[in-house]
Image (spheres, helix red, strand yellow):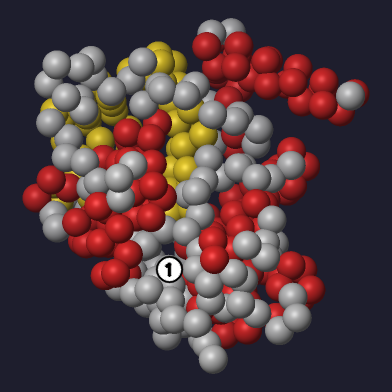
Amino acid sequence: MRAVVPSAAALSEAEASPTATAALAQQVDSVAAARPASVARLSSLPAWRADIRGLGFRYDADEAYALRDIDLTLATGRQVAVVGESGAGKSTLIRLLLKLRDYEEGSVTLQGRELAMMTAEAGRSQFAVVSQQVQLFNATVADNLRLGRPDAPMEVLREAARIAMLEPVIDKLPQGYDTIIGEWGARLSGGERQRLALARALVLDAPALLFDEPGTGLDPLTELAFGEKLRPLLAGKAALWVTHRLAGLETMDEILVLQDGRVCERGTHAELIRTRGAYYRMWRLQQQEAWARVLA
C-alpha cells in the first residue's frame, strides 16, 4: 500500500504549530505548490525581478527592530547571499518574503506587485525553498519529490535527483524511487534529506530559489561540490542564499552582511575580503575552524 502524502492545503494548516521554528519549517517546504514545472526548463522562464526597499519589521511594538532599512534586488540570473551570525535577522527576512509575517515598513515588489497586497498563495508561489529543516513524510521518494507537483513525470524527478546529487542514494535504496523513507525521512542521513529537499525545489516552476542554510547536514567537501554543481544551473532563476556559512560564496553577484537587523556591509566576496570588516572576520574564523577539523 502506498503511503499518503499530505496536500499543500493540509500543510498550510500546520502554521498553527506552537513554535515559530516548526511553523517556518513546515511552511517553506510547501510553498509554490500550484505551478507545473520541468527541471529542463530552468532557463526558460520569463525575466523576473523582486525589489526590496527600506524593509523594516518588529515582532512586537515594544521590541527592537529585527530588520531595518533593508534594500535588496533579486532578478533572473542574479545570485545574492545574505549572511550573518545567529540573531542577525536572516530568518526574519525569509518569513517576510514567504508572507509568514507582514512587514510594517518599506516595500517588497514582485514583478512590480506589492507583496503586502498579494495573497499568501500568490506570494509564496514565487519561491521554491530549500530549508535547513526539511519536511519529509512517511511515503516513497517519488511521492516526497512530487509534493509540490503531483503530476511530475519520472524524467523530471530523475533530472532533479541528478542535479541534487541524490541519484547514488536512491540507487542504493531497496525499491529505488518507490522506497518508503519513513517519518521525517528516517531512512536518510541529514545530508541526504537536504539533497532530497533541493531536488523537490527544482521540480517546481518558481522563478526564484531561496536557500535557507543549504549546507546544513553536509560535510565541507560535499557542501562545496553541491554549490559548484548547482550554481551554473541557476542562470534562468533568481537565487537568494541565506546562510551563516561563507564557503562557496565567491561566485555571488552580491553579498549582504547583517548585524542586529541592519546591513553593515555589502559587495562581492573579493570586495568584502579586501575591506577586512565583519565579513572578513567571519570568513577568517571559519577558515581556521575548517583547518582545525582537517588537522584533528
Is residue 175 placed above or below 113 in the rendered structure?
Answer: below
Question: In which quadrant is the C terminus drawn?
Answer: top right
User: What residue appears at the point 52 percent right and 87 percent down from the top-left corner?
Assistant: 2
Residue 192 in view (yes/no): yes
Name the element at disc 1: loop
**Residue 241 image point, x, y percent:** 48, 40
Judging by the rendered image, the residue that carries numbered circle 1 is 204
- State whether residue 287 is above or below residue 98: above
Query: Foreground: 206 or 63?
Result: 63
Q: Nearer the viewer, residue 140 or 113?
A: 140
Estimate the x, y position of residue 21 in percent, counting from the top left: 38, 41
* Residue 52 appears left or right of 79: left
Spot occupied by residue 15 in the image (x, y as percentages of width and height): 27, 53
Dot 1, how many residues are within 10 Å of its Cα: few (below 14), some (14-19), or many (20+)?
many
Please report the residue visible at 59 percent of the width from the left and 69 percent of the height from the top. Answer: 182
Badge 1 amino acid: Leu
| Position of residue 126 in the picture relative to residue 1 (left or right) | left
Most distant residue in the left direction: 117
Q: Is residue 73 above or below residue 135?
A: above
Q: Give residue 275's quadrant in the image.
A: top right
The residue at the point 82 percent across, 20 percent down is 292
Tell me, yes or no, if residue 77 can be seen here: no
